[in-house]
């Protein structure tokens, strides 16, 4: 029984890595396909009660699966100390 669980875990891990790699390769040339693949990966993870890593949450949109590419799909802003003073 433990061997079957280990094999299932290895197979699932390999599939998730493949989907992630495929989504990253398609992110620029076919963003809609990339989003669909990443959403499918997330669905598989949720179906198997797996937690998303913090890194994944920062780099992939949880709603649509779009891979966040700085200055292309997301706006990058660095708050300066001057900006903090103005807010107060």
Image (tube, rainbow, N blue to C red):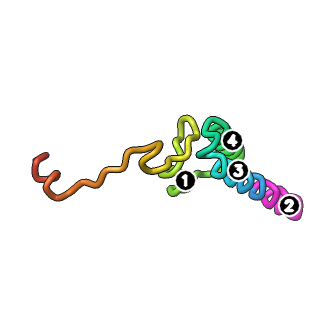
Q: Is residue 66 above or below residue 59?
A: above
Q: CA distance from mark 2 to mark 3?
A: 22 Å
Q: Nearer the viewer, residue 79 or 52?
A: 79
Is residue 57 found left or right of 80 in the rendered image?
right
Between tags 2 and 3, which lies in front? 3
Q: Is residue 7 magenta?
A: yes
State if disc 4 and disc 3 touch (CB < 8 Å): yes
Q: Are marks 2 and 1 in contact (CB under 8 Å)?
A: no
Check disc 4 and report the residue beneath it.
Answer: 37
Measured as percent of width and height from the top left, residue 59 is found at 51, 51
Residue with the mark numbered 1: 56
Q: Check disc 2 and report the residue beneath it.
A: 7
Query: Which mark is drawn over residue 22?
Result: 3
Dot 3 or dot 4: first in sequence order is 3
Confirm or deny contact between disc 3 and disc 1 (CB under 8 A): no
Give the residue displayed 71% in from the left and 56% down from the top: 17
Q: Position of residue 63 (x, y in %)?
A: 54, 35
**Residue range (magenta):** 1-12
Q: Nearer the viewer, residue 64 or 70?
A: 70
């Amino acid at each position: 029984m433990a061997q079957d669980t280990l094999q299932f875990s290895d197979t699932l891990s390999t599939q998730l890595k493949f989907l992630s790699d495929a989504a990253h390769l398609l992110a620029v040339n076919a963003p809609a396909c990339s989003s669909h693949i990443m959403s499918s990966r997330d669905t598989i993870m949720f179906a198997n009660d797996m937690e998303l890593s913090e890194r994944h949450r920062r780099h992939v949109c949880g709603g649509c699966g779009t891979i966040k590419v700085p200055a292309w799909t997301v706006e990058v802003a660095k708050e300066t100390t001057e900006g903090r003073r103005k807010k107060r």
